[in-house]
Image (cartoon, rainbow, N blue to C red):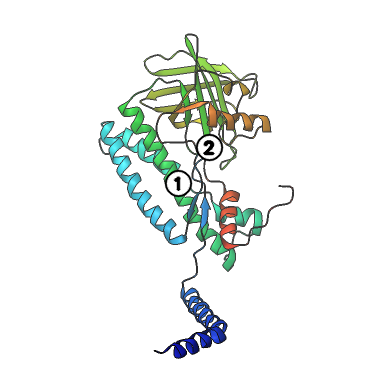
Amino acid sequence: MTKSTSRRGWGWLRLHGDWILFLATAVGVAAWAVWFWQQPPAERRLSIVLDETSPALELTLSELAQHNVRMEGRCAALLSEVKALRGVRPDTPEAKRLDELVRRVGHGSFVEEHLRTWVLRNQESPLDAYHGKLVQLGAQVDEAKCHRHVESLLQALKAATTDPTDIEGFYTNLWSHEMIIRKDGDQYTVTVSGGYWPSYNASWLDFSARPRAGVMSAHYLDPGLSDTEYVDCTVKFDRGLAVVTAEGPWRTVCVSGAYVKIASLKPYQSEVAGSPALGAAGSSMDSWLARKELVEKGLVWTSQGRTALCPYPEETIETCEKFLGTYRKPEGR
């Protein structure tokens, strides 16, 4: 190539270079646009809080379905392991009690019942497409929460069976009630409360007693219930499980059931001294904040099990509405 030819080539590039760069950029942008529009749309994600001390899970619908299948298998394996560790034989009263406890913990939040009762005011007619979608989606969200409740129950039982702890601590039925047992001199103070949701059977116990052969019993008057009718209750302890039997005025019987110890109390009592609201019981904001502080700062967890109450329908519905893009923040919140 001669010098003159080379000079003519560079001259041509200088003259047309901007157009060449423009065309190359346009081709690149077009290629990127074709690639971009061929990508599948990003799936929406549900934000689900499974217990009070854990961050939310961000899952697509397909990931949620996979999560529920995986957790169902995990819970079945944990239940078998717990029964083996506790020496529970099939078809015995203890086996049935454990199965019933798992079944009770596995309840959902009754989204359809809530919608029919408080939103649609109609118990008979078929649901429209939108509310049917909420019910269907809510069932999947509740299933994830229920699996976490069952997992917590079994994790706590496994820990208590292999490494038994003192009876003092924080207990829950992972449904509607919670219980605090504190050592007070040569006695133990037992406080149980909860029950506003989902049964609306607010009920409680508050007494002190000495355990005898793993059992505490009490017979006392509760002025908050009656000045004439006595409360009779028994708490039987068995390696992390506390089986409560109670009778008395009003709804005392609703306290009865099996509770699992999920945490010990820290040595200081400042958080407990605030009279925290336990379970789902209606209480003052100060009591709810005291409970929140107790869960966050006043407990020493004995396993990966955590406290959680029955899924609340409005919370489940809010999760589903945010996923569907139809959520509207209520006035005053």
Residue 165 - label: none
Q: Nearer the viewer, residue 13 or 227?
A: 13
Determine which quarter of the picture holds residue 274. Answer: top right
Q: Who comes first in sequence, dot 2 or dot 1?
A: 1
Identity of the amino acid at label 1? Cys
Residue type for callout 2: Ser
Q: Where's residue 183, x and y in %? A: 49, 15
* In the image, farthest residue toward the right: 332
How far apart are the two marked residues, 2 and 1, measured between alpha carbons? Answer: 13 Å
Q: Is residue 118 above or below residue 239?
A: below
Q: Is residue 308 visible?
A: yes
Q: Which mark is residue 146?
A: 1
Q: Which mark is residue 176?
A: 2
Residue 128: % across, % down: 59, 67
The residue drawn where x is 64% and y is 22% is 226
Element class at badge 1: helix
Q: How many discs mark residues in the rendered view?
A: 2
